[in-house]
Amino acid sequence: MRTGDPAVSILSWLSQVPLLDRLELAALSGWSRSAVYRAVESLEGERLVQPVAHASDLIPPTRRYTLTAAGLRRLAESEGINAERLLHERPVSEQVRRLFLGRIDALAVLYRLCCTVADIAFPIQIRCYRALPVDLCLRLADGRTIALVRLGRINERRSLARRLTRLRDGPAFAAVLLLAPDETRLRDTARRLWSFPQPCFLALERDAVKAGPDSLTWRAPSAEVALSLREALGLAGPHKAYPAERPLVRVSVPADEGLACKPADWMWSALLGPSEKRCLDLIGDWPWLRLDHLATLLGVSGARLRQLFRRAGDWGLIVRADVVGRFRLALSDRGLALLARRDRVSVGELRKRCSPELIDRAAVISWRNVKGIRSRQLLRNLAHTEAAHGFLAMLAEHARADGWELMQIDPPQRASRYFRFDDQLRSIQPDAFGVLRRDGRDYPFFLEWERRAIRPSTMARRLAPYLRYYATSQPLEDHGVLPLVLVAFDDGLAKDHFVRIAGEQMTRSAIELPLFVTSQHLLASRGPLEPIWGMPPSLNSGSNSYERAGQSDLLGLTARASPLALRR
């Protein structure tokens, strides 16, 4: 039976872990839900706490709470300390509140994981961090510390490597729990953690939010055996380090009117709904996306699409530009900052790569007049960019109609794969990477849209990186199964030549690719899920079919209902 005042306990928890909702407060504090609900209602009535509505793809709509200036003074009185000291020692200042509101989607996921840990090892203490490589640190009842790290969806290879290096070189924890946005990056992160000096456990973000203490959703970097969170904590080491962070020099009391007036940039993550956030994520991944392609990817009508980016457009998060007679969308510098803050990416670096802002605002929009390096390149090759967008939109539309799920589509910067071949670092740079799912099975694929590979020598050069990649064990390590390589040509004749050249290169190198080739005409007339895909002769059979040891299940499904039905 708990003793004391639940209202004081809630104020204390919100001063240490801002933006908790009532269910999380009940799980972490130990008070019953009814007691927490009554206490929060009373605190809100006295204007000691302030609600923030929030929802995301993974977290259902809820109300999260922060301390007001009056609540900060009440807590200081109840604990017998100076309010100024609280501002410096705990994340209650206006500056920290703005930072955490920008990260509210990430914090919501981590808080749900904290509640699951509390089910196993109650009571726990939580400390939030602004700039350290860990997001949160938990202290269990026995004193051991558990670091929580969330890897954002827009984190790229270099920023991920820097963060993991800082984590490795920092204080030692009893265990590190890392959340990854998708299976590909989970596997990539696991390889980087093989030599980590402390126990690490990884899980998909979407699984960790919904899983209970005994759900088999976690795995160690060097093992494929699934673990429960209870088992992972049982394998944690003895370390009890609780890293401290340098406090902010300038702090001020929370501005109570900040949530009620016209929304500032730090409030956008809280105010946008899940569908609006999906819309922004897609535009951020695929700059210069046509409106009809975006509507198809989201599976919504044109009217619904206009509703989805109405508020984002009013707040200046989206650039809507007329390029070559079609309206196209890109995230503005403000929109890029929104995603960067959520995923702990450098705002300046992201803008340098992806900004669609014009160098000369008085001039017309052109690739020479765009600031972002990557955005400029996509605009310069607009026909190729639009073709890749169109393929993915068509695939999403046909997948929904035929009972498939398009689980993941990654833009070129996240679709790249790096590997060692002949003691050299090599890479493949596809135009997109995706994962189709049906009946619980995943079918990953790389997409290459070719417009310039019309000479035999050019075609051979395009194939060479993939031949090297599939000559290693890297494809299986990256994805668990062999990804398909989809190549689409503008011209049907070039497609036939490419199939012939690919067969010759595969025979010469004795490496067989899961290669499927089609043309724009066949895609437009029949769709990507129809039997339009040609392939080189198999090295095993010598016939115009694709056979590979260990892929019989895929072949059986492909012959009946695969999205890549084989041309016999």
Image (cartoon, grey):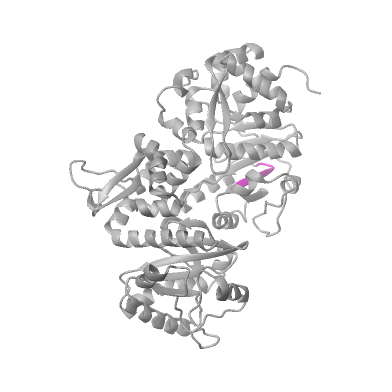
Compared to residue 449, the image places residue 77 above or below, namely above
Please provide percent x and percent y for residue 400. Answer: 51, 59
Measured from the top left, where is residue 225 in percent x and y? 71, 58
* Residue 94: x %, y % from top left: 48, 23
Residue 426 visible to an observer of this rendering: no
Left-right relation of 252 to 312: right
Measured as percent of width and height from the top left, residue 432 is found at 43, 61
Figure quadrant of residue 233 = top right
Identified at 66% across, 58% down, the residue is: 222
Of the pair 158 and 244, the residue shown nearer to us? 158
Viewer can see residue 253: yes
What is the number of callouts on the image? 0
Q: Nearer the viewer, residue 87 or 528?
A: 528
Q: Is residue 24 magenta?
A: no
Q: Is residue 177 inside the magenta stretch?
A: yes
Q: Quadrant of the N terminus?
A: top right
Left or right, 382 with respect to 340, comes to left
Outermost residue toward the bottom? 542
Residue 28, image quadrant: top right
**Residue at 45% across, 30% down:** 267
Give the residue at x 56% y 33%: 129
Q: Please report the bounds of the magenta region as a residue range.
A: 173-178
